[in-house]
Image (tube, helix red, strand yellow):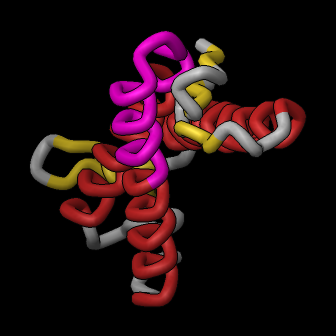
Amino acid sequence: MICIEKQMVSTGYTFYPHHVSFSEMLSSIAVQTTILESILFISFTVATILILLPHEYVKGSPVPIIVFKGHPATFHAFTICIIFAFSGAFCALMTPNSPRIASLCGCYSIASMASAIGLLIWAVRRGDHV
């Protein structure tokens, strides 16, 4: 929706004052979309890799022995963060006509991916893996 009379322009994610050029708005939307598409791709790739990694069963749950050996709770938290990142990015990309919902989904997607990266770094630094 572009509404110059009301001094605001809505592009789906962010409201810009009327003096912002259309190319600047498009570049901002492109950056946000690129970030969400990257999160979508990375989370799908990580989920696929997790299936292929060698694992051990701890209390009936498979835990990869490469990074998360001896840390099943960390692995489960990592998996949940990856799932939330994927679902948030997917929802944000599929609801461009609802800017607040898309923005909320994009934010929790980015936060979930940051949490997953933090958990992965923490698990690697623990050093109890093979």
* Residue found 35% across the figure and 55% down from its top: 78
Question: Is residue 93 magenta-colored?
Answer: yes
User: Percent from the top left, x then y, of residue 5?
Assistant: 60, 21
- Highlighted magenta segment, given as a residue range: 92-110
10 vs 127, left or right, is: right
User: Percent from the top left, x then y, of residue 87?
Assistant: 40, 27
Q: Quadrant of residue 45?
A: top right
Q: Quadrant of residue 48?
A: top right
Q: Residue furthest bottom?
A: 126
The quarter of the picture where the N terminus appears is top right
**5 over 13 or under it: above or below:** above
Q: Nearer the viewer, residue 34 or 84?
A: 34
Q: Nearer the viewer, residue 32 or 46?
A: 32
Question: Is residue 128 magenta-colored?
Answer: no
User: Percent from the top left, x then y, of residue 126?
Assistant: 41, 88
* Residue found 51% across the figure and 48% down from its top: 54
From where the camera sits, is residue 44 visible? no
User: Percent from the top left, x then y, of residue 122?
Assistant: 42, 81
* Residue found 58% across the figure and 33% down from its top: 7
Q: Nearer the viewer, residue 26 or 41?
A: 26
Q: Nearer the viewer, residue 27 or 87?
A: 27
112 vs 90, left or right, is: left
**80 over 51 or under it: above or below:** below
Q: Quadrant of residue 68?
A: bottom left
